[in-house]
Amino acid sequence: ETGVTQTPRHLVMGMTNKKSLKCEQHLGHNAMYWYKQSAKKPLELMFVYNFKEQTENNSVPSRFSPECPNSSHLFLHLHTLQPEDSALYLCASSQVGLAVSTDTQYFGPGTRLTVL
Amino acid sequence: DAKTTQPTSMDCAEGRAANLPCNHSTISGNEYVYWYRQIHSQGPQYIIHGLKNNETNEMASLIITEDRKSSTLILPHATLRDTAVYYCIVRFYGSGNTGKLIFGQGTTLQVKP
């Protein structure tokens, strides 16, 4: 496997279900991200993990719970979602440096989530 | 992060150069210009980035004006597979900072046969 992989690619769940999205990066990066893309809307940053520590939470509802057990894996745990949470969920990773530099985010293919 | 302005949509003939403009008049000295594209319902794909010099890679060229207030992404020989939404993003990066990518609506490029 190369790059950033996400599983499952498609997920249909009811509002009372609990499910998890998985992201794995094979790039040796130290930062990982969750984004949400609703229909006809720009990508929205949800969470940022830097060296396994959450450094950003963009006012995301608590029904979305991220987990980063190591720098290669990122999960998004879902529970009691609403139909409006249906969207494409994208994971990205990058290599964050300690000095002024640039880091490029590489995205996975996304998980298409439908909440019924 | 500075706001960017892009045309909503553009057409390009297959085999011709596609020139996608972006205005970022409020860009500051330590903000980079990034370009990504997103083919329908896939993850965004990194294309190129630059600070003030023009940049070229195997995918595209990035031309940044001297005052850095605008830039142009050039796809030298557009193919049908280049049909996508193209995002121009300006992004601060500082020490230990995971500089955010803030996506706008982008430009929908339609490459036509």
Image (cartoon, grey):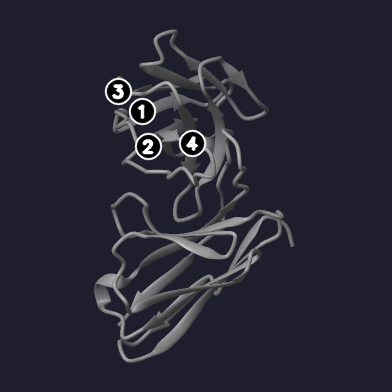
Read off the residue under disc 3: B26
The subunit carrying tag 1 is B
Q: Which residue bears the numbered disc 2?
A: B108
- Give the amino acid type for the residue marked by disc 4 in the picture: Tyr
Label at residue A89 = none
Marks 2/1: CA distance?
6 Å
* Image spot of residue B57 (x, y percent): 65, 26
Q: Who comes first in sequence, dot 4 or dot 1?
A: 1
Q: Secondary structure at mark 4?
A: loop
- Identify residue type, mark 3: Thr
To the question of a shared chain for discs 2 and 1, the answer is: yes
Judge if badges 4 and 1 mark residues of a common chain.
Answer: yes
Identified at 39% across, 27% down, the residue is B11
Instruction: Judge whether A13 appears above or below B56 on screen.
Output: below
Kind of residue at disc 1: Met
Task: Quote the CA–CA distance across marks 4 and 1.
Answer: 30 Å
Q: Nearer the viewer, mark 2 or mark 3?
A: 3
Whether residue B81 is visible, yes or no, is: no
Q: Nearer the viewer, mark 2 or mark 4?
A: 4
Instruction: Say whether mark 1 and mark 3 are on the same chain.
Output: yes
Decide: marks 2, 1 in contact (CB < 8 A)? yes
Q: Identify the residue at image location x=32%, y=91%.
A: A16
The residue tagged with tag 1: helix, strand or loop? strand
Return the disc, 2 or 1, that comes first in the chain's sequence. 1
Query: What residue would you read off at disc 4?
Result: B93
